[in-house]
Image (cartoon, rainbow, N blue to C red):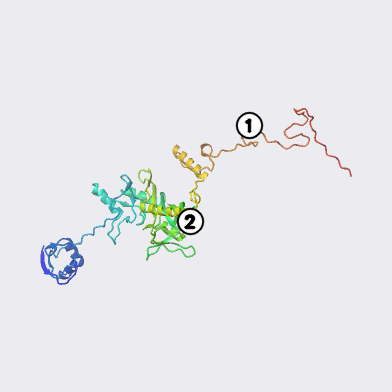
Amino acid sequence: MARLNKSWKAETEGRALAAELHEVLEVSHRQAKGIIDAGMAKVNGEALRTAGHRLKAGDELVVAFDPDTAYKALPKPRRTGPGSEVEILWEDKHLIFVNKPAGLLTVPTERTHEACLADSITDLYRRRGFKRFHLFIAHRLDRFTSGVLVFAKTPEALNGLKNLFEEHRLNRVYKAILVGELPENAGTLTGKLVEHSKSLKMSVVQPKKGEPKGAKHAITHYRVLERLPGYTVVEVRLETGRRNQIRVQFADRGFPILGDQVYGETSPLIDRQALHAELLGIRHPVTDESITVSAPLPKDMEAALKTLRNRQRVERAEAGVKGEEGIYKPKITKERKLSRVYRAKRFAEGEAETPQEPRRHGEEGRPPRRPSSRPGSGGRRPEGDAPRPRAARPGEGRPGRPAGRKPSDGTKPRTPARPKRRTE
C-alpha cells in the first residue's frame, strides 16, 4: 500500500474542499468526498469531514491517502422528522399497527434522505435489541395524510396482507373535511382513475373520452357526519385502494378536501389536506383473528373543526337562531336499528352468516308469519278470531243466521220477499 502525503496552500478564495481535492489530486468528485469522509484531509491542522467547506486563500491543506483504494462517500444521515417517536397502536410477532403523523413519508425515497416511518420503526426495534429486524411494507398513506398503518414483520404475514388488500377484504374508514356543502347525506363515488406520467397526478377518466391505458376502477362510499357553513365533514369507506383515491374523486365532484394543495387550494385553517385514516379492520393473516384498530383525530384537524364550529355559532347568533334548529344530525332509521340488534344477537350466539337480514323484528329475528285459514292450507285459525260472515244465499235469512229459526229477542223471523212476476 503506497500512501501519499501531499500538502499545499489554497489559492482560490471560497472554493469547496471537495472541488479543491478534485483539481489538485486529480481524482473524481466521488473519490474526493470519500477521502474527506475518511478523515484524511486536514485544513490548517484540523481534520474536516464537510465536503462543502469553503476554503480561504492561504489555507494549508494536508492529505494522506492511498491512490489504489476506492474511497466511498458515507450515506447522508436522514433528517429527523415528526416520526422520530413511533406511536404503536397494536402489535404481535407478525403485525404492527402504528399511527402515522401528517408530513412523514411512509417509506424512504431514492432521491431524498428524509425521515420516514419505516426507518423509525426499524430503529425502534434495533434499540430494543433486535439485530436482524425486517419490516415489510403492505400499503401506504399519502405524505400529508395521518392515521392507521399496518406493517408486516414476517413474510407469512406479508403474503396474507397482500391478499387482503388485493381482494378488498378489509375495513378502511377515513374522516375528511370537504370544501363546500354536499347536497346528499350519503352516496358512492365510482369511476376509473389514471396516473399522468409527467405530473404523476391522478385524474378521473371522463366517460365520453376513450379509456386510457392503465385506468383502474375506484369505488368510494361516504356519509355526512356534520354540516358547517361552507364545509362538510364526511366519513369515507374505501372499497378499492387507489393512489390519492379519496382526494381525486371528491375534487372531481367539486368538493376538494380542505387544505389539499395538489387537487384543491391551500387554507389558513390547516397546512395540509384534512384527511385522516381513522380505522383499519382486518382478519389476521396468520391467526385468523378479527382485529380493528383506530387512531384519534389529530390536533390540527380538531383545531380546524373548532374554528368552523365557532363560525357556525356566530352566524346562528347573528341570525337569531336558538336551540338546535337547523343543526344537521345524521339519522338512524328504524330498519338500521333493527339490523344492528339482529347482527348483535347473531354474533352473540356465534351463528354462521345468514343470506338476508329481516326488515321487521319478530321471534328469532324473523318477521312473524300470519297463519292461513283457507281450506287445504294446513293452517289453523288463531283462537279468538271470529269467522268472516258469508254472503246470504237466496232463501236464507241474515248472513250467519239459519233461516226459519226464531231469534232470541222474541221477534218473528223475516222471510225474504218473493220477486213479482211481470205479465206482458
Asked whether residue 17 appears in the rendered view, the answer is yes
The image shows residue 22 at horizontal and vertical percentages of 18, 69
Instruction: State the mark number for residue 129.
Output: none
Q: Are marks 2 and 1 in contact (CB under 8 Å)?
A: no
Between residues 379 and 24, which one lies in front from this camera angle? 24
* Secondary structure under the numbered disc 2 in the rendered image: loop
The image shows residue 356 at horizontal and vertical percentages of 51, 44
Asked whether residue 130 appears in the rendered view, the answer is no
Instruction: State the mark number for residue 182.
Output: 2
The image shows residue 35 at horizontal and vertical percentages of 16, 63
* Secondary structure under the numbered disc 1 in the rendered image: loop
The image shows residue 78 at horizontal and vertical percentages of 26, 57
Asked which quadrant contains residue 71, the reply is: bottom left
Between residues 339 and 261, which one lies in front from this camera angle? 261
Residue at mark 2 to residue at mark 1: CA–CA distance: 54 Å
Answer above or below: position of 85 versus 353. below
Instruction: Judge depth for marks 2 and 1 and give the one in front.
Output: 2
Q: Quadrant of the image for the C terminus?
A: top right
Residue on which disc 1 sits: 384
Query: Disc count in the image?
Result: 2
The outermost residue toward the right is 424
310 sits to left or right of 30: right
286 sits to left or right of 53: right
Which amino acid type is marked by label 2? Leu
Which amino acid type is marked by label 1? Gly
Q: Quadrant of the image for the N terminus?
A: bottom left
Indicate which disc, 2 or 1, sits on the residue closer to the N terminus.
2
Picture residue at 53% right of the left edge, 36% below the top: 363
